[in-house]
Amino acid sequence: MTIRPYQKKDFRYVQDICVATSKYADNDTPVTRATLTAVLCDYYLDNQSDYCFVAVDDNDIPVGYVLCSVDRDDYEEKMTELYLPLLHKLNSSEYFLYNAQLKVTSRYVRMGYLAHMHIHMLEQYESEELGTQLISTLENKLREMYVEGIYLVCGEKSSARALYDKLGYEDIDFLKGSVVYGKKFFTED
């Protein structure tokens, strides 16, 4: 596998991976797809693509990704104005859940975890090695930009938790059914 920066030609592939790796994989309808991608990938691809990387196969087709936002103000503003209204129209229960989570996760920024990420790989390509490569590529970019820290929300029973522990992420919070992991790159003395 090769890790490279996201390109516009990857947009649909990233959406496909987002849906395929979700709990709605067996219910890939236009509404489900729009709901998931609105909150889990479209903002990042549309607005923070410099912090998005894909793992590609020998044919340059994405099989995994890591997406990141480093600008919380922009994230909250655009999610609220552009992406959440679509979610509200399509799935009001998911809208209220995500809107509440958006408010709760803003506290991590105050703790110095300015960036947040999502990482997913198609099941047949999923490996600790590929996950490490994707995360390391993103972390290197964040260090270059002097981003203080990053967080992610992970399912409480996810097998990926072992990888985050191995890569030096610490559990910084617990949300219903999820663990919030954070990692600091720089700290103020």
Image (cartoon, rainbow, N blue to C red):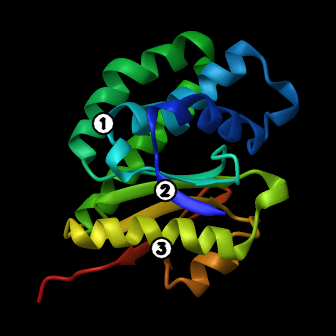
Task: Examine the rendered structure and indicate whether residue 55 appears above or below residue 81.
Answer: below
Separation of residues labelled 2 and 3 (CA atoms): 12 Å
Q: CA distance from mark 1 to mark 3?
A: 26 Å
Neighbourhood count class around disc 1 (C-alpha, 10 Å): few under 14, some 14–19, many 20 upward: some
Q: Report the residue at 82% width, 35% height from top.
A: 25
Q: Which mark is residue 76?
A: 1
On the rendered structure, is 81 left or right of 175?
left
Q: Please give the residue where the numbered disc 2 appears in the rendered image.
A: 4
Q: Position of residue 88 (x, y in %)?
A: 52, 16
Identity, as a three-letter code, of the amino acid under mark 2? Arg
Which residue has dot 3 on it? 136
| Amino acid at the residue labelled 1 | Glu
What is the C-alpha distance between the residues marked 1 and 2?
Answer: 27 Å
Q: Quadrant of the C terminus?
A: bottom left
58 vs 104, left or right, is: right
Front residue of this view, candidates 5 and 33: 5
